Image: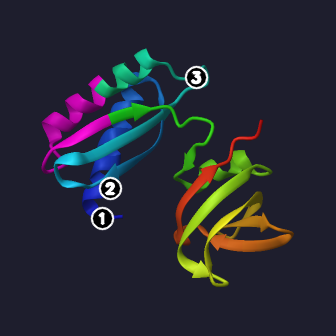
Amino acid sequence: MSKQDIKLETLVSQAVAVTGFTYWGLEFFRAGKHSILRVYIDHENGIGVDDCAEVSRQVSSVLDVEDPISGEYVLEVSSPGMDRVLFKPEQYSQYVGAKLNVKTKMPIEGRRKFSGQLNSIENNCIILEVDNAEYEIPFKNIEKAQVVPQF
């Protein structure tokens, strides 16, 4: 993470905390005038549209004052949803036994995309079972991990 990314995440997480919601993570898609800052929030009672609007106002106010992003962008505030993206190692422990889709930064055994059950977390790695084989994927090699909803 760059210093700018760390500053942005710090500002956003603090702004969310003020509202009483849980900061889940953020994604920032840089695309010139069409950049998007997507902030995910959570709460034990769920998230509604009014909750997103409240957090959006708070985050927007902080970002307007601190101005950590140069240029134009759209701020979106959302619930992580059932197919939530996992951002931090501590979030994975809630999903042991669940199915995940994982994309790695560097290939592991010739592949970068994995879809399987999260069996455990060990030594800064996730252990993912894919087609009866276990893969040890270091957190630092995970580009994106997402929970696959089970119905």
Q: Which residue is mark 1?
A: 2
Residue 55 x, y percent position in the rendering = 36, 25
Task: Confirm whether the magenta stretch covers residue 88.
Answer: no
Q: Position of residue 19 (x, y in %)?
A: 39, 23
**CA separation, marks 2 and 1?**
6 Å
- On screen, residue 119 versus residue 66, left or right, reads right
- Answer above or below: position of 90 versus 150: below
Going from N to C along the chain, the mark reached first, 3 or 2, is 2
> Alpha-carbon distance for marks 3 and 1?
32 Å
As drawn, the label of residue 46 is 3
Residue in the foreground of this view, choosing between 74 and 17: 74
The magenta span reads 57-75
Quadrant in the picture for residue 110: bottom right
Q: Closest to the observer: 2 or 82?
A: 82
Q: Quadrant of residue 137?
A: bottom right
> How many numbered marks does the figure carry?
3
Q: Earlier in the sequence, mark 3 or mark 1?
A: 1
* Farthest bottom residue in view: 110
